[in-house]
Structure formats: structure tokens, C-alpha cells
Amino acid sequence: MLNRSLRRFIRLLWRFIWRGVFAFVLLSVALVVLFRFVPPPGSMVMVERKIQSWVHSEPIDIQRQWRSWDSLSDNAKLAVIAAEDQRFPHHRGFDFVELRRAWQASRDGGQLRGASTLSQQTAKNVFLWTGRSWTRKGLEVWFTLLIETLWNKQRILEVYLNVAEWDSGVFGLEAASQHYFGVSSNALTERQASLLAAILPSPRTRSAARPDAQVERRSQWIRQQMRNLGGAGYLEQL
């Protein structure tokens, strides 16, 4: 009798789990398809920042203005690719060259470095929470595969530039351009765009308007990479 009850419980549990998995897959695919055509109303990182502000009783004003692909500076598009993911037009969401280099550096005792592509960062910013865990990493892989399958490269970069965090509460290229330089996102100079790209690894602790020596060096390197990639013509590959 006990064994029969246990087997019945296990069958019900598995049925519940598989229904939950099916519902998650269906919902995630629907959201990715929707955001292929409709601007995401926000991102999970924005939600996380709001929750943190409530928990710590530190009000935060979320600044964000969506801008379409044609309204975004080519300088900014190229600067972000040069800084974050130079093989962006050619991979399918995961840069195995950089992953191998990061693994080799770690194996040889060097500092562990990130190898996330712009596709992975977009998936994480829009759909997931920050932090490190195998669960979040697994979901990041799933959403990265989805957006690489259902969006084109222009859409991925467009969404990334509109949801990336550039300072506490400052999300998206338009808000960042106004925040740091007082100009619209379609008017960024090469230097301004490279400074914005240079602070992306630690946007809440660095400033594009008052760059320290490290940010200046990185922005100079980014501008050189932009030229090495061939300038704005590189964007035609997207």
C-alpha cells in the first residue's frame, strides 16, 4: 500500500515538473518573439535595482528612453562591439575562442576573466537577475539560444544598447548620453562613445564624464579597435 502511494506521488510530482517546464518554455519563447517586434518595457536588472532600493530604503530614479536602431549612434554601436565582443557578427551567441582563452588563462594561474558575448549580456539583462550561479548560467544559455534564433544581430545590439546599465539608475544609451554629456544618443562623438563603452565593466563605480586614468586608457584602446575593425562599415555585417 505504501509503495503504491509512493509511486503515485512520484508520478504526480513528475507530471507537475514537466508541466512547469513546458509552461516555462512556452512563456519564454513567447516573450522572446514579442520582444523581437516590441521594445521590452524594462529589464530584470531594473527590477532588481528597484527591489534593492526598497530593501535598503535608498530611493532610485530609473532613467531610460528607448531609441530605435536608426536613432542610435553608429559610433556607440561600434564602440560597444569593439569593447565587448569583436566577433559579434560571426558567432551564434557564444564566442568559443574567448571561452578557450579564458579557460587557458585560468588554468595557467592567471586572473579569471569574463568571456560573455553581447548576446549573453542581452539575455541576462532583459530576462535574468545578476549574480553568479549554475541555475542563472543555465537560463542564460537558454535565453541566449532563443534570441540568437529568433532575433537578428541588429535587434540584439539594439536591445542591448537600450537596456545596458551605465550608472546607478541610468539604463540605455539615450539616458547615458544625456546623463554624461548632455547630448542625444545619435550625436555621440567617437571619443564620447568610447568612454561610455569603457565604463561598461563597472558602470556604477566609473564615470564617462570624469574618466580616471584606467578609463582613459581603455577608451583609447577601444578607439583603436574601432579603426582596426574598419569603422562604421563594420556594422554592415550585422
Image (cartoon, rainbow, N blue to C red):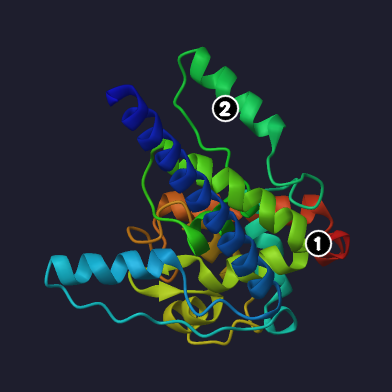
Q: Residues within 10 Å of mark 2 (few under 14, many from 20)?
A: some
Q: For the view shown, which residue lies furthest in the top direction? A: 108
Q: Work out whether residue 44 or residue 72 is closer to the camera in this orientation and state it.
A: 44
> In the rendering, at what x and y percent does residue 199 appear?
46, 58
Q: Quadrant of residue 227?
A: bottom right
Of marks 2 and 1, the one in the foreground? 2
The residues tagged by marks 2 and 1 sit, at their Cα atoms, a distance apart of 27 Å
* Residue drawn at point x = 49 percent, y = 20 percent: 106
Q: Could one spot residue 221 in this view of the protein? A: no
Q: Work out whether residue 151 or residue 82 is closer to the camera in this orientation and state it.
A: 151
* Residue named by callout 1: 231
Q: Is residue 134 left or right of residue 58?
A: right
Is label 2 in contact with label 1 (beta carbons under 8 Å)? no
* Residue drawn at point x = 49 percent, y = 41 percent: 137
Q: For the view shown, which residue lies furthest in the front direction? A: 1
Q: Residues within 10 Å of mark 1 (few under 14, many from 20)?
A: some
> In the rendering, at what x and y percent does residue 46 appear?
38, 70
Is the residue 145 above or below the residue 60 in the image? above
* Dot placed on the residue nearer the N-terminal end, 2 or 1: 2
Q: As shown in the figure, which amino acid type bears the numbered disc 2? A: Ala
Q: As shown in the figure, which amino acid type bears the numbered disc 1? A: Gly
> In the rendering, at what x and y percent does residue 224 appear?
70, 52
> In the rendering, at what x and y percent does residue 87 appear?
75, 45
Mark 1 residue element: helix
* Residue named by callout 2: 102
